[in-house]
Image (tube, grey):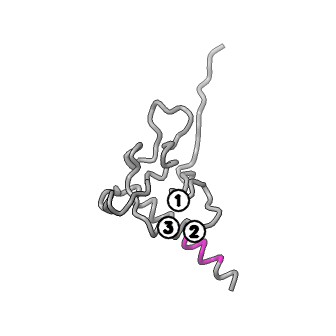
Amino acid sequence: MTASAVVVRRSVLGRACPACAELRCADPAECLYFLTSRPWADCSECAGSGWAGEDDCLSVFCWVCNGSGLEEHTARSVVHATVSARPRARLLAHIERLTAEVSDSVAVAA
């Protein structure tokens, strides 16, 4: 009997929030504040790609940043220029999604 290959499929949209590390934020307003009030830079483990290394067989995404490609830094340790294009785009898309969720919840509450 021949062995069959195990195929792992996970959507690129399944990358976790860099703030709370969840796929769907429990408190979008808190995550939105966290993402917009702190400096972010490329993850030190995956260099901003978000993908796990070839030796990591347990996950498709980086174990440090959960696929976001971003890590929080202090203002002294990083400048915004050190965020490469793809992680910056993911951060902006995440901020836009959270902004829409927060706006919808405020509109419903009013």
Residue drawn at the location 34% of the way across and 55% of the way down:
84
Residue 67 place in picture, x, y as percent:
50, 49
Report how far apart the C-alphas of labels 2 and 1 lie in the structure. Answer: 9 Å
Residue 33 place in picture, x, y as percent:
51, 70
Q: Nearer the viewer, mark 2 or mark 3?
A: 2
Report how far apart the C-alphas of labels 1 and 3 lie in the structure. Answer: 11 Å
Find the magenta span and give its range: 95-105
> Hey, what amino acid is under mark 3?
Ile
For the residues bearing labels 1 and 3, Cβ distance under 8 angstroms:
no
Q: Is residue 91 above or below residue 69?
A: below
Judging from the image, what secondary structure is the residue with disc 1 in? loop
* The furthest residue to the top: 1
Residue holding disc 3: 95
Tag shown at residue 30 = 2
Q: Nearer the viewer, residue 34 or 82?
A: 34
**Rendered image quadrant of residue 2:** top right
For the residues bearing labels 2 and 1, Cβ distance under 8 angstroms:
yes
